[in-house]
Amino acid sequence: MASLTFARPLSPEDEALTELDRRYAEAFGLEPLLSRSSVLFYVRTGHAFVAVRAGEATGFVLAQAVWNGARPTVYVNRLAVPDPEDTASREALLEAVTKSAYDAGVYDLWVQVPEADAAAAAALGAKRYRALPERLYARTLGSRGQR
């Protein structure tokens, strides 16, 4: 029998997820996002979850609610599941963050994923998320931007 995959809220003890974040970031040319302080930040948002199967973390989602002047929106900053075949973890994470947004009375969700993460795009489409006709541009200022 296959192990059940479920999502649980992110906790301050989840610093060990940094290895999952490193693997995911490396696979898609991103900077790792997790640190002790970022874990503590996302714990407080109420929109961050860890996918678990057989007692092991298999992925995570980091999101926060933001007021944009018109309405609140939950922004997913990282949907990280390093195994491209792990559909169950992506589904559990998307269901958890969607429910947390709905329960908070936030009805708009925006998810940022790498263009090359076809598995995330497929999972999002299966959950009725749609791609927007936009591009995200970033610039890093200061000494970090000089690297």
Image: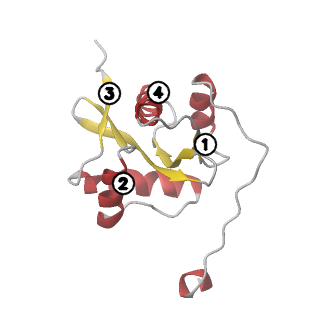
Q: How is the image coloured?
A: secondary structure
Q: Earlier in the sequence, mark 4 or mark 1?
A: 4
Q: Earlier in the sequence, mark 2 or mark 1?
A: 2
Question: In the picture, residue 136 is in which quadrant?
Answer: bottom right
CB atoms of marks 2 and 1 within 8 Å: no
Q: Amino acid at mark 1?
A: Asp
- Report which residue position mark 1 lands on: 117
Q: Which mark is residue 91?
A: 4
Q: Earlier in the sequence, mark 2 or mark 3?
A: 3
Q: Residue furthest right?
A: 133
Q: Residue at x 54, y 53 (%)?
A: 67
CB atoms of marks 2 and 3 within 8 Å: no
Q: Is residue 35 above or below residue 132?
A: below
Between disc 2 and disc 4, the foreground one is 2
Name the spot of residue 124 as percent of width and height, x first: 59, 31
> In this view of the protein, which residue sits in the foreground, 50 or 86?
50
Question: In the picture, residue 5 is in which quadrant?
Answer: top left
Q: Amino acid at mark 3?
A: Phe
CB atoms of marks 4 and 1 within 8 Å: no
**Mark 1 Cα shell of 10 Å, populated few (<14), some (14-19), many (≥20):** some
**Mark 3 Cα shell of 10 Å, populated few (<14), some (14-19), many (≥20):** many
Q: Residue furthest front?
A: 70
Between the C-alphas of marks 4 and 1, the distance is 15 Å
Question: Element type at marker 1?
Answer: loop
Question: Element type at marker 2?
Answer: helix
